[in-house]
């Protein structure tokens, strides 16, 4: 038997070195190299190796008649939407989010509803005692759900117990950073422990057909703590986003081998737990009884779901010689700088002596490039102190030449706007031929939008 070799693994980036150093050569972080022993084989790896490896099957032909695994509904429609239709048997899902955002609450609600629907569910908490989980379930009104609870941190003990009987349909591990394997040296939460524990749990999921959900902590920069390879090992990576000061939460798929990554689930945090939001547009729009300068409504698109959000801009003129500030919340600051540059270079508007503040109402984060025209309209409105009509929405992409380019799914955006009572839309000129009940005003260039808003 080969002698185990020692190596040093960076706890920040996961890089491997054969000797200890005070600073990691890859990420330049200090005191992050921790010794671990390589060459250790886990029980599930040994079992897999003794079986002689796997066999090949044909993509088509006789093997194609084998019944494929079905989706398991979580009982929460918004959760299933983000997953692509529900859990897949034998899949591994990683969900991350800030502390207190509601990850454990969401998974406990899903586990309880699946158990009440007849599925076998096991919930393992490495952070809370079983009685504490039961207390939280009772507060959520789920105290009678037949969910198997356990408070454990040893991966071997958990898998040994689950292997004795019929494996559960769903296994929740809260959280993977608290799990440890006694075959690997190091404290729980280190790169080696997280990788080894996740590998054993994922192998159990593939061999027994259990859908495994791993809760992951996040670092101060918002990324999931632990080795980057953890996100490659799992089938689905979900991010639970939202500000703790706001009521809403968004479940977004970052990686999904069994579905798309463009769908989101929207929830609201209430006293009884997380509730689904079937109409997110009503959540992110404020009451607009009269026109307010610097505000525009933008129909964003999240997968197949349009979401109307309010874009707010504030322009403050400064005294001569003062350094202007640019502050952005919920949008890309680099794209704001580009829009300001196009407005100055192509439209003759001056923002160089003004402070510019941009905010997406409700804490929503917009990544859609179609928001360019709505942002430009809000900036022009704030600078000229002329409000955008309250019954109008705006969308379109702006090029550096000042051209307003068409965007995808224009009819779907306008349909959602008409459903919520809007009557007009500021759109690219190429989109004016779309069939809609809205009154469309098309613009080929950003200069035409400025002239329209300033009444030139």
Image (cartoon, rainbow, N blue to C red):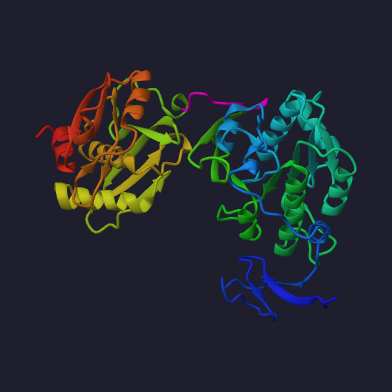
Judged left or right of residue 316, residue 280 is right
Residue 217 in the image: above or below residue 445: below
Which residue sits at x=61%, y=66%? 13
Rendered location of residue 98, percent (x, y): 61, 46
Residue sitting nearer the eye, 323 or 372: 372
Residue 345, percent from left and from top: 17, 53
Residue 15: quarter of image: bottom right
Quadrant where the image shows the N terminus: bottom right
Residue 92: horizontal and vertical position, in percent? Answer: 68, 46
Please give the name of the residue rendered at 30% of the width and 58% of the height, measured from the top-left corner.
323
Relative side of 49 to 435, left or right? right
Residue at 64% across / 61% down in the picture? 227
Looking at the rendering, the stretch of residues picked out in magenta corresponds to 271-280
Residue sitting nearer the eye, 334 or 443: 443
User: The C terminus appears in which quarter of the rendering?
Assistant: top left
User: Residue drawn 54% across and 26% down?
Assistant: 277
């Amino acid at each position: 038997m080969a002698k185990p070799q020692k190596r040093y693994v960076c706890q920040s980036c996961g890089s491997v070195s054969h000797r200890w150093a005070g600073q990691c050569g890859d990420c330049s972080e200090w005191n992050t190299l921790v010794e671990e022993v390589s060459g250790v084989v886990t029980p599930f790896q040994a079992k897999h190796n003794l079986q002689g490896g796997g066999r090949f099957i044909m993509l088509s032909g006789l093997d194609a008649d084998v019944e494929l695994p079905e989706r398991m509904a979580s009982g929460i429609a918004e959760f299933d939407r983000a997953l692509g239709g529900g859990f897949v048997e034998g899949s591994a899902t990683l969900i991350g989010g800030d502390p207190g955002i509601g990850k454990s609450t969401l998974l406990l609600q899903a586990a309880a509803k699946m158990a009440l629907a007849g599925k076998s569910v096991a919930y393992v908490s490495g952070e809370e005692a079983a009685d504490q989980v039961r207390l939280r379930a009772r507060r959520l009104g789920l105290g009678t759900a037949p969910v198997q609870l356990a408070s454990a941190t040893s991966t071997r003990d958990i898998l040994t117990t689950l292997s004795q009987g019929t494996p559960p349909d769903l296994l929740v591990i809260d959280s993977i950073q608290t799990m440890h394997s006694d075959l690997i040296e190091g404290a729980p939460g280190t790169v080696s422990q997280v990788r080894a524990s996740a590998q054993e749990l994922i192998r159990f999921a593939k061999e027994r057909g259990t859908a495994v959900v791993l809760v992951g902590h996040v670092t101060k920069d918002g990324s999931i703590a632990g080795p980057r390879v953890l996100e490659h090992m799992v089938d689905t990576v979900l991010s639970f986003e939202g500000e703790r000061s706001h009521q809403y939460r968004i479940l977004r798929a970052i990686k999904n081998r069994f579905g798309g990554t463009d769908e989101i689930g929207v929830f609201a945090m209430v006293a009884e737990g997380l509730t689904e939001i079937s109409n997110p547009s009503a959540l992110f729009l404020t009451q607009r009884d009269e026109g307010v300068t610097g505000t525009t409504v933008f129909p964003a698109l999240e997968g197949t779901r349009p979401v109307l959000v309010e874009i707010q801009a504030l322009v403050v003129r400064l005294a001569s010689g003062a350094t202007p500030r640019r502050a952005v919340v919920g949008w890309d600051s680099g794209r704001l700088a580009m829009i300001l540059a196009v407005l100055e270079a192509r439209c003759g508007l001056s923002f160089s002596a003004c402070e510019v503040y941009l905010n997406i109402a409700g804490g929503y984060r917009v990544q859609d490039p179609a928001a360019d025209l709505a942002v430009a309209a809000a900036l022009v409105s704030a600078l000229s102190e002329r409000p955008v009509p309250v019954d109008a929405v705006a969308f379109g992409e702006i090029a550096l030449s000042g051209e307003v380019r068409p965007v995808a799914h224009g009819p779907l955006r306008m349909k959602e706007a008409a459903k919520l009572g809007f009557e007009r839309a500021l759109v690219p000129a190429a989109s004016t031929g779309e069939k809609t009940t809205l009154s469309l005003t098309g613009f080929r260039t950003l200069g035409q939008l400025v002239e329209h808003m300033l009444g030139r």
